[in-house]
Amino acid sequence: SLDCRFNYRIWSLAKLGDKMSFDKMVFIVGVSRSGTTLMRRVLNKSTKFALLDENNYMGHLWPPLAMRKIFGRFGSLSNDQNVIKLVDWFYSPDFDNYSRLKTVSWQWQWFRDEVPKEQLLERILSSDRSEKDIYLVFMELFCEEREGEVIGEKTPSHIKYIDTIMQWYPDAKIIHMLRDPRAIYTSEVRRRQEKSPSPPYRQLRKFPLLLKLFLMFQVTWTWGDALKRYRKYSEKYGSNYRVVQFESMIGSPESEVRSICDWVGVEFQEIMLEQQVMSEGFTQGKKGFDTTASRRWEKHIDSWARSWFESRFRKALLEVDYDI
C-alpha cells in the first residue's frame, strides 16, 4: 500500500548515509558484434568494476524504445505520484510487454528480481528525478550489490549518445570497441541465421540472400557512422575517450587490460584474464580469448560481400590498420 511505501521511506531515509560514493564511471559502446560484451565481461571479472549490461536507457535503434522515453510516459517525475506509478508498472507484468518489437533485457529483469520495489522507489524519490539521475540510481544500485568501485554500463547503441553521456557525467570514460566490418558482418550473418527472435530478422530468415543483403547494408551504415564518431570524439574528449580494437584485445589481452585499468585508475587483477567464450560464435564455450576470431571471417564471408566492404571502406580500413 501507499502507507507501507512511505513507512519504508522514513526508515530508508535514515539509511541514505550508508549509500556508497562512486567517482569513476566507464561506458562501453560500439557497433554490435564488435566486442562490447567481451570488454564488459573482462572488466566485471575485477572486484573493482560493476558495469550494467545492455539496457538501451539512453537510446535504441528505434528511438521510442529508449527506456528513458518509456519512463517519461508517466509524466513529470517531480510528482511523487508519477514516480509511484512508474515503479509499480516496472514491477508489474505489464513491463514485460512494453514493446512488441523488443523483449525485456535480462538487466532490467535483474533489477526487478534483486532490488526490492520499496528500495528502488526510495532511491528515485531521493534523487533529483532527472533522466540523468534516474540512470545513476540504477548504475549505483548494481554497483552496490557487487560492492564495486567503478559504475557504468555497456550498450552498443549508446555510441550515438556519447555527447549526452559526457554532458551528464563529465568525468566519465568512454571505451569505443572497434572491429573489422567484414568480421562483424560474418558474425551477424551466423547469429541471425541461427537465432532471430525479433523483427525484421525473424521474417528475413526465410530468405537467406535477402537477410545477407540486409545485414551487409546494416553493417555498412553502422560501421561507417561509428568511424565518423571515432574521429570526432577522439578529438573532442581527449583522454576520456579510448578506442580499443577487438583484434588487439584478443591478441594481447593482458597488455590491453592492464592499460585500461591504469587509464581508469584501478588495480589490474589477474582474474580478469580468466575468460570463457560466451557469445553465439564459432568457438562458444572455449576457455580463454578466442584468438582465431581476428581472421576467421575470411573462411566464411561471401566473395561479393567481401568485395563490397573492401571497395566501400578501402581508405577507412587502412586508416585503422586493417588489411585489404
Image: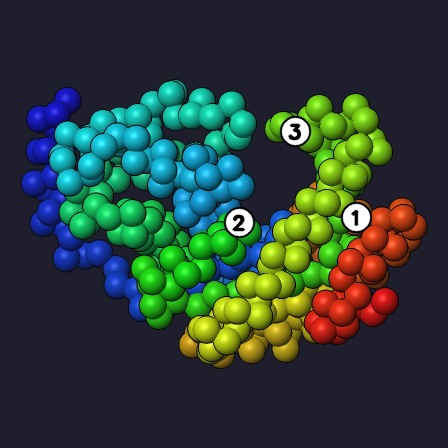
In the rendered structure, which amino acid carries the disc numbered 3?
Pro
Tag on residue 200? 3
Where in the figure is residue 115, as x and y percent of width and height? 32, 39
Q: Is residue 125 visible?
A: yes
Compared across the picture, whether 216 is left or right of 163 comes to right
Q: Position of residue 153 (x, y in %)?
A: 45, 54
Q: Callout 3 environment at 10 Å: few (<14), some (14 to 19), or many (20+)?
A: few
Amino acid carrying mark 1 in the image: Thr
Q: Is residue 222 above or below residue 172?
A: above
Q: In percent of the image, x 79 and y 39: which residue is there?
A: 213
Q: Is residue 137 visible?
A: no
The mark found on residue 186 in the picture is 1
Label 2 environment density (alpha carbons within 10 Å; few <14, some 14–19, many ≥20)? many
Mark 1 neighbour class, 10 Å CA radius: few under 14, some 14 to 19, many 20 or more: many
Q: Residue at x 10, y 33 (%)?
A: 6
**Residue drawn at 30 percent across, 52 percent down:** 132
Give the mark nearer the N terminus: 2 vs 3. 2
Q: CA distance from mark 2 to mark 3?
A: 18 Å
| Mark positioned earlier in the residue sequence (1 or 3) | 1
Mark 1 and mark 3: Cα distance apart in space: 18 Å
Q: Are marks 1 and 2 in contact (CB under 8 Å)?
A: no
The residue beneath circle 2 is 157
Colour convention of the picture: rainbow
- Amino acid type shown at disc 2: Ser
